Amino acid sequence: MKGIWFIAFSALVCFGASHVDVRLVSDHQVIKKGEPFQIALRMDMRDHWHTYWENPGSSGLPTTVEWQALDGLSTGKLQYPVPLRFVDAAGFVTYGYDSTTYLFTEAVYSGDAPTITIEAEVQWLECKEICIPGKAEVSITLDVGEPKQSSQFETLSKAARQIPAQHDSDVPFTYASKTQFKGTHWSGTIQVTPKTQAFNPEGATYFPGTNPYGELKSVSVQQDGDLLVFDLAYEAWEDTVPEDLNMWGVLVFGDQAYRINVHPDVGSVKAVTNHSGTKQGIGFILLLALVGGIILNLMPCVLPVLSLKVMSFIGEAGESHSRRVMLGFVYTLGIMCSFLIISGVIVGLKMTGEQVGIGFQFQNAPFVVFMIGLLFVMSLSFFGVFTINPPQSSGMTEWTMKSGPAGAFFNGILMTLLSTPCTAPLLGSAYGWAMTAPNWQLIVVFQFVAVGLALPYLALCAAPVLLRYLPKPGAWMEQFKIFLGFPLLLTVVWLLWVLGNLKGHPAVIGTLVFLTFLGLALWIAGTAQYSSKRWLGIFTALGITLLGATMGMRIQAPSRIDWVPYSETQLAQARKSNQLVFMDFTAEWCATCKFNEKLVIDSKSVRDAFTSNDVVTMKVDYTQYDPQITQMLASFDRAGVPLYVIYPGQNEPIVLPEVITKNMVIDAIETAATTRNQRSAL
C-alpha cells in the first residue's frame, strides 16, 4: 500500500497551478502628468522553479509583457535584471531567475484623467524538471496629481540597481572586442581596461545577449596585467554572419553590471562549419529522449497503466510468441501515434505564436474532465460494476487486462496521456531543447521518447525467457484486478486536484456530481447487461448520465449576479440612498443555500427582477464563524443560514423563508419596490 500512496502524493507534484505569482507595482502612488515613473512586474517563484532572462540560453523562452493601449500613456522597453546561470544534468546552459524578480519599464502619462488603470498581459515559461507556460492579466491603478512615492519605492530603488547600466563615458572602464571564425569554432574576446585604481574586477563574468547566429558555450576570464580578458567560445549555427552584426552582452563586476555591444571584425566573416557539431548535438538529445522515455515507466503518473500492461502480459502467457510480439508492436504504435499527435499540436500552436509546454492538454479543463471520467469508468470496470466483454470470456476487461490489438493500441494511448504531465531524469533537457528546435527535430525527439516509453514492454514481449520471472495466471488475477482499480481512483483524485487549480472548487464539485450519476448509470447498465431488459438498462443509464452532466455543469457555472460583499457601511449608504438591498446570508457548507442560489436566485426571471428594480445584491458569507453575522442572524430570530432579507430603502426589512421559490422572491422584490416608492413620494 505504501507504493500506492507514493503514486498519489508524488503525482500531485507533477502538475498543478502556476508556480509563479505575478503582479504590477509602481514606485509612485500618485504620478504627475508628463513626468516619468517606474512600473515593475514582480515575479515570485516557488522553490526550485525558475523563469528566463531576455536571452534564455540553450532552451526556454523570455518573459514578455504586452501593455494594453491607454490614451496618454507611453511605456519604454522592458528591462531585465542580471540573471543567474543554470546548468542542467545534460550540460545545457540557460539564464534566468529562481527567486523574487522585478522587470522594469519607464512610463509617462500625458492624459487628463484623475485616475488611470494600467493593464498588461504577461507570458512566461516556468521550469523545474518540466516546463509549463504561464499567462496572466495584471493591472495597477494610480492617481494623477502631485507626485507621491508609493510604499514600494525603496524596494524598487534597490531592485533597479540590478538592471545593467549602459556603457558610457561615466563607467570606470573601457573595453574592446573582436570575434572570428576558425573551423567549427566561433571565438570572441572582450578586453576590459580599468580607468581608475578603484575599479574592482572581483567576481567578473559575462552573460551573452540574444544572437541568431550562434550560442555561447563557455566563458573564461583571466587577468593580464591591467587588462581583464574574457575569452568566449561559441557554437556556430550559420555558415556566414552579416558584416553589420551587432551583438550585445552584460559584463558583471561584483554588484555592478553594464550592457555592452560586441562587434565582429569588419568585413566578410565566414564560419567554415561542417555541421558535425549540430549532428552530434541532436544525436545526444535523441539519446537523452530514448533513455528518459525508458525511465518514464517508473514515474508516478504512469505506474497504474504500467501495472495493467504487466497484467495483460501475464494474461497473454498462453498465447503464441508471434502474437505477443504483434501486441507489443501495436502497443508501441499506439504510443508513437499519440506522441505524433501531441507534437503536431505543439508545432501548430507554436506556428500561431502560442507558448506551449509539455502536458499542455492538462491545462484544458474539458480534457481533464474527460480523463477523470475515463479513469473512473475503468476503475468501476475493474471493481466488476459492469464488464465490456461477453460473459463467456475470461471475466476481465478486454481492453485492459487481456488485450487484443484494439486493447493494446488503447493502452498505448492511455499510457501517453498519463505520462505527459510527468517527466523523468534527462527528459527535461530533451524536452527543453526540442521546444526551441526546428519543428521536424521536435517531432523526432518526441518519437524517441515514445519508443523509450514502449521499449520495456516491447522487450518483454520479444523475449520469452523473461516469462519465467512472471507469476503464473490464476484466480489471483481477478482479485488483483480489483486491487488495481484503487490506483486508478487515486489518479482520479489527482486529476480532480488539477481541475481545482484550473477552475476552482465549484468545478470539482460539479465533476463529482457528474461522477456520482455516472457511477449509478454504469451500475444500472451492469445489472441489466445480461438480462432480457438490457436495452432498457442502457437507455436508462444514458438518461441518468445526461442528467448528471447537466447538473454538474449547472453547479460549476459561475453566478451571473454581481454580488457585493457585505459591509455595514455599504448597507447603510444603500439604505440612505433609498435603494433596494437583497441580502443573501450563505455559507459554502450549506447545501440548501447552494440549491436556492443555483435554481432560484441565479435564474433569469429573478435576475431580471433585480435589474429592473435596481437592486443591490449583497452576500453575507458565514462559511467561517463570525460573531457579528451571528448577532445579525439572531436579530432576525434565526440560528443559522440560509437567510434572505430585502431592505426597501429605509423601510422595515422583508424576511423570506429558508426554502424559496422564484415567484416568492420576485413578489417580495416588487412589494419592496412599491413600499420604497410610496415612502419616496411622501
Image (cartoon, grey):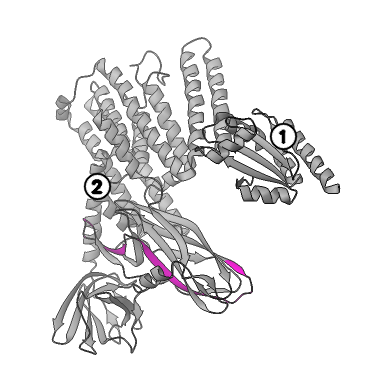
Q: Name the residue tied to disc 2.
A: 292
Q: Name the residue tied to disc 1.
A: 665
Name the residue nearer the viewer: 339 or 627: 627
208 relative position to 341: left or right: left
Give the quarter of the image for residue 265.
bottom left
Q: Position of residue 219 (x, y in %)?
A: 20, 72
Q: Nearer the viewer, mark 2 or mark 1?
A: 1
Q: Position of residue 646 (x, y in %)?
A: 70, 39
Mark positioned earlier in the residue sequence (2 or 1): 2
- Find numbered disc 1 in the image and state the secondary structure of the residue it sits on: helix
Q: Which residues are magenta?
A: 88-116
Give the distance between the C-alpha atoms of the residues marked 2 and 1, in whole angstroms. Answer: 61 Å
Q: Are marks 2 and 1 in contact (CB under 8 Å)?
A: no
62 relative position to 621: left or right: left
| Quadrant placement of the N terminus | top left
Q: Is residue 440 above or below residue 186?
A: above
Q: Position of residue 21 (x, y in %)?
A: 41, 55
Q: Counting other residues with Cα less than 10 Å from the Cα at mark 2, is it few (<14), some (14-19), or many (20 or more)?
A: many
Mark 1 residue type: Val
Name the residue nearer the viewer: 404 or 243: 243
Mark 2 residue type: Gly
Give the quarter of the image for residue 381.
top left
Q: Is residue 140 visible?
A: yes
Q: Is residue 604 visible?
A: no
Q: Counting other residues with Cα less than 10 Å from the Cα at mark 1, is it few (<14), some (14-19), or many (20 or more)?
A: many
Please tell me which residue is depicted at 58% across the width and 27% down the height of the picture. Answer: 547
